[in-house]
Image: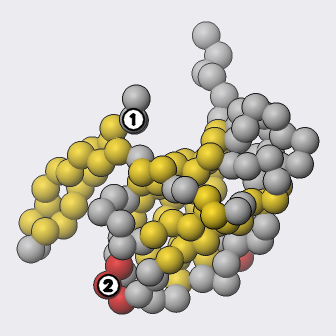
Amino acid sequence: MAIQFLQDTLINGHFSFQESAFTSVVASGNTHTVDLTADTNNYKVIANNATNTLAFSNLSDKVIGKTGSIAIQNPASVGSLGWAALPATAYTPGGVAISFDTSSNGIAVISYLVMSANKVLINYVGDFGSYPQ
């Protein structure tokens, strides 16, 4: 079952709502490449029990202003789980490296905004857990 989101979309100067599900990012080796020209704004990455790499493809003037989320799900077994440094096109608050959550079945979200053909602003939130009842 896909998680559904409603998102404001600017079309010809007017806002409209667009329903968008997460699109699975298929890894090549341990590289998870987010295609920014895909007809979606939200992506889902299933991390491998290895050193994973997050990459962006088709970053150009045509996708400036695109925003969305990248949900990351860790595997149940995490003996070798890790994350490589982000690409040089990724900009984080304060320019600091992300400390990825590497716990078993961990969930994290990266929100992103494409600012230019060579700059993606990202914000990482990890270590999600069930709200105490």
- The local secondary structure at tag 2 comes to helix
Q: Nearer the viewer, residue 26 or 54?
A: 26
The percent coordinates of residue 124 (x first, y second) are 63, 56
Mark 1 or 2: in front is 1
Q: Nearer the viewer, residue 16 or 106?
A: 106
Using a 10 Å C-alpha cutoff, classify the residue at mark 1 as few (fewer than 14 neighbours), some (14 to 19) or many (20 or more): few
Dot placed on the residue nearer the N-terminal end, 1 or 2:
1
Mark 1 belongs to which amino acid? Answer: Ala
The disc label shown at residue 2, or none: 1
The disc label shown at residue 53, or none: none
The image's colouring method is secondary structure
Q: Residue furthest top?
A: 133
Image quadrant in which you'd find residue 102? top right
Image quadrant in which you'd find residue 30? bottom right
The answer to whether residue 117 shows anywhere in this view is yes
Q: Residue at x 82, y 53 (%)?
A: 50
The percent coordinates of residue 21 (x first, y second) are 35, 45
- Looking at the picture, does residue 10 appear above or below residue 2? below
Image quadrant in which you'd find residue 106? top right
Judge from the rendering whether residue 8 lies leftward or rightward of residue 76; answer left or right. Answer: left
Residue picked out by circle 2: 62
Q: Residue at x 55, y 56 (%)?
A: 26
The answer to whether residue 99 shows anywhere in this view is no
